[in-house]
Amino acid sequence: MPRILSTSLPARVGSTVTVAGWVHRRRQLKSVTFLILRDAAGLAQVVVTDAGLRARLAELPEESVVEVTGRAVGNPAAPAGAELVDPTVRPLGDPAVPPPFDVYRPELTAALPTQLDHAAVALRHPSRSAALRISAALVSGFRATLDGLGFVEVHTPKIVAAATESGANVFALDYFGRPGYLAQSPQFYKQMLVGVLERVYEVGPVFRAEPHDTTRHLAQYTSLDVEFGFVTDHRDVMRLLRDVLAGMLDRLADHPNPPARIPVVPEEIPAVHFAEALAIAGASPDEPDLAPAHERALGDWARAGHGSDFLFVTGYPLAKRPFYTHPATDDAPSGGPVTRPAPGDGRAGVPRRAAYSNGFDLLFRGVELVTGGQRLHRYADYLAALAQRGEPIEPYAGYLDAFRHGMPPHGGFAIGLERMVARLLGATNVREVTAFPRDLHRLDP
Protein backbone atom coordinates (compact mmCIF):
# COMPACT_ATOMS: atom_id res chain seq x y z
CA MET A 1 0.00 0.00 0.00
CA PRO A 2 1.54 3.36 -0.99
CA ARG A 3 2.52 5.57 1.91
CA ILE A 4 0.72 8.88 2.42
CA LEU A 5 1.72 11.88 4.52
CA SER A 6 -0.05 12.91 7.71
CA THR A 7 -1.70 15.94 6.10
CA SER A 8 -3.51 13.64 3.64
CA LEU A 9 -5.36 11.74 6.37
CA PRO A 10 -8.55 13.88 6.37
CA ALA A 11 -9.06 13.19 2.67
CA ARG A 12 -8.78 9.44 3.27
CA VAL A 13 -11.28 9.05 6.11
CA GLY A 14 -12.93 5.63 5.88
CA SER A 15 -10.01 4.09 3.98
CA THR A 16 -7.17 1.88 5.12
CA VAL A 17 -3.91 3.78 4.66
CA THR A 18 -0.22 3.54 5.49
CA VAL A 19 1.84 6.27 7.08
CA ALA A 20 5.48 6.19 8.18
CA GLY A 21 7.75 8.38 10.21
CA TRP A 22 9.33 8.85 13.62
CA VAL A 23 7.80 8.03 16.99
CA HIS A 24 7.30 11.57 18.22
CA ARG A 25 5.45 10.79 21.46
CA ARG A 26 3.70 7.96 23.25
CA ARG A 27 0.86 8.71 25.66
CA GLN A 28 0.00 5.57 27.55
CA LEU A 29 -3.31 5.57 29.42
CA LYS A 30 -5.05 2.73 31.30
CA SER A 31 -6.61 1.06 28.28
CA VAL A 32 -5.31 2.94 25.26
CA THR A 33 -2.02 4.22 23.90
CA PHE A 34 -1.85 7.28 21.67
CA LEU A 35 1.11 7.04 19.32
CA ILE A 36 2.04 10.37 17.75
CA LEU A 37 3.90 9.86 14.51
CA ARG A 38 5.97 12.65 12.91
CA ASP A 39 6.66 12.83 9.19
CA ALA A 40 7.79 15.52 6.76
CA ALA A 41 4.33 17.12 6.70
CA GLY A 42 3.40 17.10 10.38
CA LEU A 43 1.96 14.81 13.05
CA ALA A 44 -0.46 11.89 12.88
CA GLN A 45 -2.25 10.30 15.82
CA VAL A 46 -2.56 6.52 16.06
CA VAL A 47 -5.01 4.98 18.54
CA VAL A 48 -3.77 1.63 19.92
CA THR A 49 -6.03 -0.55 22.04
CA ASP A 50 -4.53 -4.01 21.38
CA ALA A 51 -2.76 -5.09 24.58
CA GLY A 52 0.10 -6.85 22.80
CA LEU A 53 0.86 -3.90 20.53
CA ARG A 54 0.63 -1.51 23.48
CA ALA A 55 3.24 -3.57 25.29
CA ARG A 56 5.58 -3.51 22.31
CA LEU A 57 5.17 0.24 21.87
CA ALA A 58 6.04 0.74 25.54
CA GLU A 59 9.50 -0.64 24.73
CA LEU A 60 9.96 1.46 21.58
CA PRO A 61 11.83 4.73 22.29
CA GLU A 62 10.92 8.08 20.81
CA GLU A 63 12.58 8.82 17.44
CA SER A 64 12.38 5.19 16.33
CA VAL A 65 11.22 4.89 12.72
CA VAL A 66 8.04 2.91 12.07
CA GLU A 67 5.39 2.23 9.46
CA VAL A 68 1.74 2.22 10.50
CA THR A 69 -1.22 0.83 8.56
CA GLY A 70 -4.71 1.50 9.85
CA ARG A 71 -8.16 2.88 9.13
CA ALA A 72 -8.48 6.67 8.96
CA VAL A 73 -11.32 8.16 10.97
CA GLY A 74 -12.20 11.78 11.53
CA ASN A 75 -11.28 13.43 14.82
CA PRO A 76 -11.07 17.23 15.00
CA ALA A 77 -8.95 16.95 18.15
CA ALA A 78 -6.25 14.90 16.40
CA PRO A 79 -3.19 16.78 15.07
CA ALA A 80 -4.17 16.28 11.40
CA GLY A 81 -7.95 16.37 11.94
CA ALA A 82 -8.06 12.60 11.53
CA GLU A 83 -6.45 9.61 13.20
CA LEU A 84 -5.67 5.94 12.57
CA VAL A 85 -7.44 3.13 14.41
CA ASP A 86 -7.01 -0.66 14.40
CA PRO A 87 -3.36 -0.24 13.43
CA THR A 88 -0.49 -2.52 12.69
CA VAL A 89 2.94 -1.12 13.46
CA ARG A 90 6.12 -2.27 11.75
CA PRO A 91 9.56 -1.00 12.82
CA LEU A 92 11.69 0.15 9.88
CA GLY A 93 14.96 0.07 11.79
CA ASP A 94 16.53 -0.59 15.14
CA PRO A 95 15.05 1.09 18.22
CA ALA A 96 16.42 4.61 18.41
CA VAL A 97 18.95 5.65 21.02
CA PRO A 98 17.13 8.33 23.03
CA PRO A 99 18.45 11.82 22.14
CA PRO A 100 19.97 14.03 24.88
CA PHE A 101 16.81 16.20 24.91
CA ASP A 102 13.11 15.67 24.26
CA VAL A 103 12.16 16.48 20.67
CA TYR A 104 8.43 16.09 21.42
CA ARG A 105 8.23 19.01 23.82
CA PRO A 106 6.79 22.30 22.48
CA GLU A 107 10.09 24.08 23.12
CA LEU A 108 13.64 22.80 22.91
CA THR A 109 14.96 23.33 26.42
CA ALA A 110 18.54 22.31 25.73
CA ALA A 111 21.13 25.09 25.56
CA LEU A 112 22.07 26.16 22.04
CA PRO A 113 25.57 24.61 22.16
CA THR A 114 23.99 21.27 23.06
CA GLN A 115 21.53 21.60 20.19
CA LEU A 116 24.36 22.37 17.78
CA ASP A 117 26.43 19.45 19.05
CA HIS A 118 23.48 17.18 18.26
CA ALA A 119 22.16 19.09 15.25
CA ALA A 120 21.00 16.00 13.36
CA VAL A 121 18.43 15.41 16.11
CA ALA A 122 17.74 18.99 17.21
CA LEU A 123 16.74 19.92 13.66
CA ARG A 124 13.91 17.39 13.89
CA HIS A 125 12.13 19.63 16.37
CA PRO A 126 9.25 21.37 14.55
CA SER A 127 10.53 24.83 15.47
CA ARG A 128 13.98 24.15 14.03
CA SER A 129 12.75 22.38 10.90
CA ALA A 130 10.20 25.17 10.32
CA ALA A 131 13.06 27.66 10.07
CA LEU A 132 14.64 25.58 7.32
CA ARG A 133 11.34 25.44 5.44
CA ILE A 134 10.91 29.19 5.71
CA SER A 135 14.43 29.61 4.40
CA ALA A 136 13.55 27.42 1.42
CA ALA A 137 10.37 29.41 0.75
CA LEU A 138 12.31 32.69 0.75
CA VAL A 139 14.84 31.31 -1.73
CA SER A 140 11.99 30.07 -3.92
CA GLY A 141 10.46 33.55 -3.92
CA PHE A 142 13.85 35.11 -4.65
CA ARG A 143 14.36 32.89 -7.68
CA ALA A 144 10.80 33.23 -8.97
CA THR A 145 10.82 37.03 -8.76
CA LEU A 146 14.11 37.37 -10.61
CA ASP A 147 13.24 34.71 -13.19
CA GLY A 148 10.12 36.71 -13.94
CA LEU A 149 12.24 39.81 -14.54
CA GLY A 150 14.52 38.11 -17.05
CA PHE A 151 17.43 37.33 -14.75
CA VAL A 152 19.58 34.25 -15.27
CA GLU A 153 20.78 32.08 -12.39
CA VAL A 154 24.54 31.51 -12.47
CA HIS A 155 27.01 29.44 -10.48
CA THR A 156 30.45 30.90 -9.88
CA PRO A 157 33.69 29.51 -8.39
CA LYS A 158 34.08 29.28 -4.64
CA ILE A 159 37.86 29.00 -4.87
CA VAL A 160 39.44 32.24 -6.03
CA ALA A 161 42.90 33.71 -6.56
CA ALA A 162 42.36 37.02 -4.76
CA ALA A 163 40.26 38.37 -1.91
CA THR A 164 37.02 39.93 -3.17
CA GLU A 165 36.50 42.44 -0.41
CA SER A 166 40.15 43.07 0.46
CA GLY A 167 41.29 42.81 4.05
CA ALA A 168 42.29 39.76 6.03
CA ASN A 169 38.96 38.00 6.57
CA VAL A 170 39.63 35.28 4.00
CA PHE A 171 40.22 31.55 4.36
CA ALA A 172 43.49 30.76 2.62
CA LEU A 173 44.19 27.35 1.12
CA ASP A 174 46.85 25.54 -0.82
CA TYR A 175 45.65 25.29 -4.41
CA PHE A 176 48.04 22.79 -6.00
CA GLY A 177 51.06 24.55 -4.58
CA ARG A 178 49.90 28.14 -5.01
CA PRO A 179 47.76 30.35 -2.79
CA GLY A 180 44.01 30.34 -3.14
CA TYR A 181 41.08 31.55 -1.07
CA LEU A 182 37.51 30.59 -0.34
CA ALA A 183 35.31 33.19 -2.00
CA GLN A 184 34.00 35.96 0.24
CA SER A 185 31.32 36.64 -2.36
CA PRO A 186 30.63 36.05 -6.07
CA GLN A 187 31.10 39.78 -6.63
CA PHE A 188 33.79 39.73 -9.30
CA TYR A 189 32.15 36.95 -11.28
CA LYS A 190 28.63 38.34 -11.20
CA GLN A 191 29.96 41.70 -12.44
CA MET A 192 31.82 40.02 -15.27
CA LEU A 193 28.67 38.09 -16.18
CA VAL A 194 26.73 41.34 -16.50
CA GLY A 195 28.87 41.77 -19.62
CA VAL A 196 27.50 38.45 -20.86
CA LEU A 197 23.91 38.09 -19.64
CA GLU A 198 23.09 41.63 -18.38
CA ARG A 199 20.98 40.33 -15.46
CA VAL A 200 22.25 37.58 -13.18
CA TYR A 201 21.70 36.15 -9.73
CA GLU A 202 23.21 33.43 -7.59
CA VAL A 203 22.26 31.48 -4.47
CA GLY A 204 25.29 30.00 -2.82
CA PRO A 205 27.68 29.84 0.14
CA VAL A 206 30.19 32.56 0.91
CA PHE A 207 33.03 32.40 3.38
CA ARG A 208 34.25 35.04 5.82
CA ALA A 209 37.02 34.41 8.31
CA GLU A 210 35.10 36.49 10.83
CA PRO A 211 36.99 36.99 14.08
CA HIS A 212 33.68 37.94 15.71
CA ASP A 213 31.95 35.56 18.11
CA THR A 214 28.56 37.26 17.96
CA THR A 215 24.92 36.27 17.53
CA ARG A 216 24.84 37.65 13.96
CA HIS A 217 28.10 36.44 12.34
CA LEU A 218 28.90 33.13 10.66
CA ALA A 219 32.05 31.97 8.90
CA GLN A 220 29.90 30.44 6.15
CA TYR A 221 26.47 31.69 5.20
CA THR A 222 24.13 31.65 2.24
CA SER A 223 24.22 34.77 0.09
CA LEU A 224 21.48 35.75 -2.34
CA ASP A 225 23.36 37.81 -4.92
CA VAL A 226 22.03 39.99 -7.74
CA GLU A 227 23.80 42.08 -10.37
CA PHE A 228 22.36 43.82 -13.42
CA GLY A 229 23.41 46.28 -16.07
CA PHE A 230 22.26 49.57 -17.56
CA VAL A 231 21.38 51.25 -14.27
CA THR A 232 21.27 54.99 -13.79
CA ASP A 233 22.58 54.80 -10.24
CA HIS A 234 22.09 52.99 -6.94
CA ARG A 235 18.42 53.95 -6.76
CA ASP A 236 17.62 51.53 -9.57
CA VAL A 237 19.24 48.83 -7.46
CA MET A 238 17.21 49.83 -4.42
CA ARG A 239 13.96 49.68 -6.39
CA LEU A 240 14.75 46.18 -7.61
CA LEU A 241 15.67 45.07 -4.09
CA ARG A 242 12.32 46.31 -2.83
CA ASP A 243 10.47 44.18 -5.40
CA VAL A 244 12.63 41.13 -4.70
CA LEU A 245 11.94 41.35 -0.96
CA ALA A 246 8.21 41.64 -1.61
CA GLY A 247 8.33 38.57 -3.84
CA MET A 248 10.24 36.60 -1.22
CA LEU A 249 7.86 37.47 1.59
CA ASP A 250 4.80 36.75 -0.55
CA ARG A 251 5.88 33.10 -0.51
CA LEU A 252 5.23 32.99 3.24
CA ALA A 253 1.55 33.96 3.01
CA ASP A 254 0.44 30.35 2.46
CA HIS A 255 3.26 28.73 4.39
CA PRO A 256 2.06 26.02 6.83
CA ASN A 257 4.15 27.53 9.67
CA PRO A 258 4.54 31.23 8.85
CA PRO A 259 6.32 33.71 11.11
CA ALA A 260 4.15 35.34 13.76
CA ARG A 261 4.27 38.59 11.78
CA ILE A 262 5.15 38.77 8.11
CA PRO A 263 6.43 42.26 7.38
CA VAL A 264 4.85 44.38 4.67
CA VAL A 265 7.36 45.86 2.24
CA PRO A 266 6.36 49.50 1.60
CA GLU A 267 5.93 50.60 -2.00
CA GLU A 268 8.80 52.94 -1.25
CA ILE A 269 11.11 51.92 1.56
CA PRO A 270 12.18 54.95 3.64
CA ALA A 271 15.76 56.05 3.09
CA VAL A 272 18.20 58.29 4.94
CA HIS A 273 21.70 59.38 4.03
CA PHE A 274 24.51 58.01 6.16
CA ALA A 275 25.21 61.44 7.67
CA GLU A 276 21.57 61.75 8.70
CA ALA A 277 21.57 58.20 10.04
CA LEU A 278 24.39 59.08 12.43
CA ALA A 279 22.41 62.02 13.75
CA ILE A 280 19.24 59.95 14.18
CA ALA A 281 21.18 57.26 16.04
CA GLY A 282 22.88 59.82 18.28
CA ALA A 283 26.30 58.83 16.98
CA SER A 284 29.33 61.01 16.55
CA PRO A 285 29.40 62.67 13.09
CA ASP A 286 32.93 61.33 12.67
CA GLU A 287 31.86 57.67 12.89
CA PRO A 288 32.96 55.87 9.70
CA ASP A 289 30.33 53.12 9.97
CA LEU A 290 27.18 52.11 11.84
CA ALA A 291 27.57 49.99 14.97
CA PRO A 292 24.87 47.44 15.94
CA ALA A 293 23.50 49.89 18.53
CA HIS A 294 23.13 52.53 15.81
CA GLU A 295 21.29 50.05 13.58
CA ARG A 296 18.88 49.20 16.39
CA ALA A 297 18.16 52.89 16.99
CA LEU A 298 17.53 53.41 13.28
CA GLY A 299 15.23 50.40 13.20
CA ASP A 300 13.18 51.89 16.06
CA TRP A 301 13.09 55.23 14.23
CA ALA A 302 11.86 53.65 10.99
CA ARG A 303 9.16 51.69 12.80
CA ALA A 304 7.94 54.62 14.88
CA GLY A 305 8.13 57.29 12.20
CA HIS A 306 7.34 55.35 9.04
CA GLY A 307 5.65 52.14 10.19
CA SER A 308 8.34 50.23 8.30
CA ASP A 309 10.43 47.23 9.27
CA PHE A 310 12.86 48.27 6.53
CA LEU A 311 15.15 51.27 6.17
CA PHE A 312 17.70 52.17 3.51
CA VAL A 313 20.87 53.92 4.62
CA THR A 314 22.51 55.44 1.56
CA GLY A 315 25.72 57.33 0.84
CA TYR A 316 28.10 55.32 3.00
CA PRO A 317 31.61 56.78 3.21
CA LEU A 318 33.56 55.65 0.18
CA ALA A 319 36.49 54.68 2.41
CA LYS A 320 34.31 52.02 4.10
CA ARG A 321 33.09 50.45 0.86
CA PRO A 322 34.95 48.01 -1.41
CA PHE A 323 37.13 49.53 -4.13
CA TYR A 324 34.62 48.70 -6.88
CA THR A 325 31.94 50.98 -5.34
CA HIS A 326 30.92 54.00 -7.42
CA PRO A 327 31.46 57.43 -5.81
CA ALA A 328 28.38 59.44 -4.95
CA THR A 329 26.75 61.27 -7.83
CA ASP A 330 24.39 63.34 -5.67
CA ASP A 331 25.57 66.56 -4.11
CA ALA A 332 24.76 65.99 -0.45
CA PRO A 333 22.58 64.23 2.08
CA SER A 334 18.91 65.03 1.57
CA GLY A 335 18.82 66.92 4.84
CA GLY A 336 21.13 69.66 3.55
CA PRO A 337 24.71 70.30 2.48
CA VAL A 338 27.55 68.36 4.00
CA THR A 339 29.33 70.62 6.44
CA ARG A 340 31.79 68.14 7.86
CA PRO A 341 34.70 66.39 6.18
CA ALA A 342 35.02 62.69 5.65
CA PRO A 343 37.05 60.93 8.38
CA GLY A 344 40.70 61.83 7.97
CA ASP A 345 40.05 64.80 5.70
CA GLY A 346 41.63 67.94 7.12
CA ARG A 347 39.53 70.38 5.11
CA ALA A 348 36.94 71.04 7.78
CA GLY A 349 33.60 72.38 6.58
CA VAL A 350 34.18 71.63 2.90
CA PRO A 351 31.36 69.67 1.22
CA ARG A 352 32.85 66.61 -0.47
CA ARG A 353 30.44 64.39 -2.32
CA ALA A 354 33.40 62.25 -3.40
CA ALA A 355 33.77 61.27 0.26
CA TYR A 356 30.50 59.36 -0.07
CA SER A 357 29.46 56.47 -2.26
CA ASN A 358 26.52 55.24 -4.27
CA GLY A 359 26.45 52.33 -1.87
CA PHE A 360 23.69 51.46 0.57
CA ASP A 361 22.68 49.07 3.31
CA LEU A 362 19.18 47.87 4.00
CA LEU A 363 18.30 47.48 7.68
CA PHE A 364 15.59 44.97 8.60
CA ARG A 365 14.18 45.37 12.09
CA GLY A 366 17.30 47.15 13.21
CA VAL A 367 19.88 44.79 11.71
CA GLU A 368 21.88 45.15 8.51
CA LEU A 369 20.42 42.65 6.05
CA VAL A 370 21.57 43.78 2.60
CA THR A 371 24.58 45.59 1.19
CA GLY A 372 24.45 46.93 -2.34
CA GLY A 373 25.03 49.81 -4.66
CA GLN A 374 26.30 51.01 -7.99
CA ARG A 375 29.69 49.72 -9.17
CA LEU A 376 32.46 51.32 -11.15
CA HIS A 377 32.27 50.31 -14.80
CA ARG A 378 35.23 52.10 -16.46
CA TYR A 379 38.63 50.46 -16.56
CA ALA A 380 40.49 53.69 -15.76
CA ASP A 381 38.35 54.23 -12.68
CA TYR A 382 39.35 50.81 -11.37
CA LEU A 383 43.02 51.55 -11.83
CA ALA A 384 42.59 54.83 -9.97
CA ALA A 385 40.58 53.23 -7.15
CA LEU A 386 43.15 50.50 -6.57
CA ALA A 387 46.03 53.00 -6.69
CA GLN A 388 44.30 55.24 -4.16
CA ARG A 389 44.06 52.30 -1.75
CA GLY A 390 47.58 51.12 -2.38
CA GLU A 391 46.33 47.85 -3.87
CA PRO A 392 48.32 46.08 -6.61
CA ILE A 393 46.67 45.46 -9.96
CA GLU A 394 48.07 41.99 -10.63
CA PRO A 395 45.79 39.96 -8.29
CA TYR A 396 42.76 41.48 -10.01
CA ALA A 397 43.98 41.27 -13.60
CA GLY A 398 41.44 38.67 -14.75
CA TYR A 399 38.60 40.66 -13.20
CA LEU A 400 39.76 44.02 -14.49
CA ASP A 401 40.13 42.73 -18.02
CA ALA A 402 36.34 42.63 -18.39
CA PHE A 403 36.20 46.39 -18.01
CA ARG A 404 38.70 46.94 -20.80
CA HIS A 405 36.26 45.41 -23.25
CA GLY A 406 33.16 47.45 -22.48
CA MET A 407 30.90 47.19 -19.44
CA PRO A 408 27.60 49.04 -18.89
CA PRO A 409 26.81 51.01 -15.75
CA HIS A 410 25.66 48.35 -13.32
CA GLY A 411 24.94 47.54 -9.72
CA GLY A 412 23.66 44.88 -7.41
CA PHE A 413 23.16 43.64 -3.88
CA ALA A 414 23.54 40.63 -1.60
CA ILE A 415 21.06 39.37 1.01
CA GLY A 416 22.22 37.30 3.96
CA LEU A 417 19.68 34.48 4.07
CA GLU A 418 20.25 33.18 7.61
CA ARG A 419 20.16 36.68 9.05
CA MET A 420 16.87 37.36 7.28
CA VAL A 421 15.28 34.18 8.64
CA ALA A 422 16.52 34.97 12.15
CA ARG A 423 14.92 38.41 12.08
CA LEU A 424 11.68 37.04 10.66
CA LEU A 425 11.37 34.44 13.41
CA GLY A 426 12.66 36.62 16.22
CA ALA A 427 15.60 34.29 16.88
CA THR A 428 18.20 35.81 19.16
CA ASN A 429 21.06 33.98 17.45
CA VAL A 430 21.53 33.31 13.74
CA ARG A 431 22.74 29.80 14.61
CA GLU A 432 19.20 28.92 15.70
CA VAL A 433 18.03 29.03 12.08
CA THR A 434 21.14 27.54 10.43
CA ALA A 435 21.28 23.81 9.78
CA PHE A 436 24.95 23.22 10.55
CA PRO A 437 26.53 26.58 11.42
CA ARG A 438 30.20 27.34 10.97
CA ASP A 439 31.61 30.00 13.24
CA LEU A 440 34.76 30.95 15.11
CA HIS A 441 34.69 27.74 17.15
CA ARG A 442 32.54 25.19 15.31
CA LEU A 443 33.66 22.94 12.47
CA ASP A 444 31.51 19.92 13.36
CA PRO A 445 29.00 18.38 12.83
Image: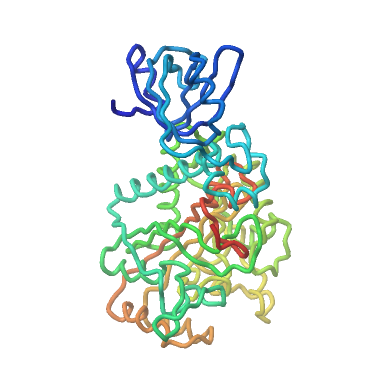
Q: 186 above or below 404? A: above
Residues 298 and 121: in front is: 121
Whether residue 254 is visible? no
Identify which residue is drawn at 52% across, 77% down. Answer: 166
Q: Quadrant of the N terminus?
A: top left
Residues 166 and 413: in front is: 166
Residues 411 and 70: in front is: 70
Q: Quadrant of residue 350?
A: bottom right
Q: How many marks?
A: 0
Q: In this figure, which colouring scheme has been used for the structure?
A: rainbow
Q: In the drawing, does residue 144 fall left or right of residue 21?
A: left
Pinpoint residue 232: horizontal percent, then vertical percent.
38, 62
Pinpoint residue 439: horizontal percent, then vertical percent.
59, 62
Pinpoint residue 190: horizontal percent, then vertical percent.
36, 66
Q: In the drawing, does residue 398 fall left or right of residue 126?
A: left
Q: In the drawing, does residue 431 fall left or right of residue 414?
A: right
Question: Looking at this rendering, what residue extends furthest in the front direction?
Answer: 52
Identify which residue is drawn at 33% across, 71% down. Answer: 192
Pinpoint residue 245: horizontal percent, then vertical percent.
45, 47
Residues 358 and 48: in front is: 48
Q: 110 above or below 105? A: below
Identify which residue is drawn at 36% across, 80% down. Answer: 400
Whether residue 265 is visible? yes
